[in-house]
Each structure stands twice: as C-alpha cells, then as structure tokens.
Image (spheres, grey):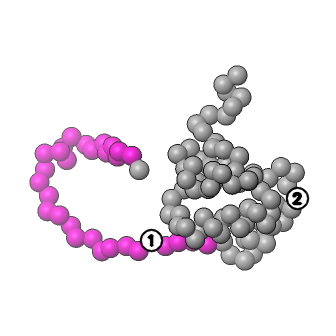
Amino acid sequence: MGPVVMGLPEDLLYQTLSPVELAGSTAVQGYPSPRDMHLLESLLSAARHPLMVVGGSGWTAESRQQLESFVEKRVLPVVTAFRRQDRFDNSHAHYDGDAGLVAATALT
C-alpha cells in the first residue's frame, strides 16, 4: 500500500470534534460458485490463447499452491500484475513475466 491523500473542506480543518466509536468489521472473502467455475472451464476450453493475469492482495501459501495446480492442470500461461511478481513462482514453467505499466507496443 502507498500513501493516502485526503482532500477536506477548509472549515473542517479548524473544528474540534469528539471521536465516534465505530463497530469493527469482518472482512468477507468471496469465492466463485461451482456454477461460476463451470462457466470458467467452458470459456477456457473455447479460448484460443488464454492468459491468466494474477495480482491483488490476500494471497496465502495455500492459495498460491491452488493457483499453481489450477494452471498446471489447464496448461495456462501466467503473468503477474504490476508490483505483484510474488503472487506466482517466477521460476515456474507457466510463468510468462509481469504485465508492467504499459503495453509493449507503446514502447515501439
């Protein structure tokens, strides 16, 4: 994560407020349903050149292993999103590099 910038109206900068106690929240992790996975399998089977782009947060050692198994079973190439190179083993046979910031055609 990087820095956070907040823009506040000037009149708020000089007021004193009492803190408000907020109830805690629990993060909810969503998972694809069996129906969604079946649809994904159909789409992958029909794809001429499938490519998996991996990124985001919340990865565990177990989820990385599950991803590797998924990729190996389906023989999918994998690229990682910008600054997310650690989401997939860079020495894995299916790793095709990181997506970077710009498309390679923009550099030519």
Residue 101 forms part of the magenta stretch: no
Q: Tell me where residue 84 appears, x and y as whole percent.
A: 55, 50
Residue type marked 1: Ala
Say what secondary structure mark 2 lies in: helix
Report helix, strand or loop for mark 1: loop
Label of residue 98 in the image: none
Quadrant placement of the C terminus: top right
Mark 2 and mark 1 lie on one chain; the one further toward the N terminus is 1
8 falls in the magenta region: yes
Amino acid residing under circle 2: Ala
Q: What is the x, y in percent for residue 48?
A: 87, 51
- Left or right side of 91 for 38: right
Q: Is residue 35 visible?
A: yes
Q: What is the quadrant of residue 106 in the picture?
A: top right
Whole-percent x and y of residue 68? 68, 63
Which range is magenta? 2-31
Find the residue positioned furthest to the top: 108
Residue lying furthest front: 91
Q: Which residue is mark 2?
A: 46
> In the image, is residue 10 above or below residue 23?
above
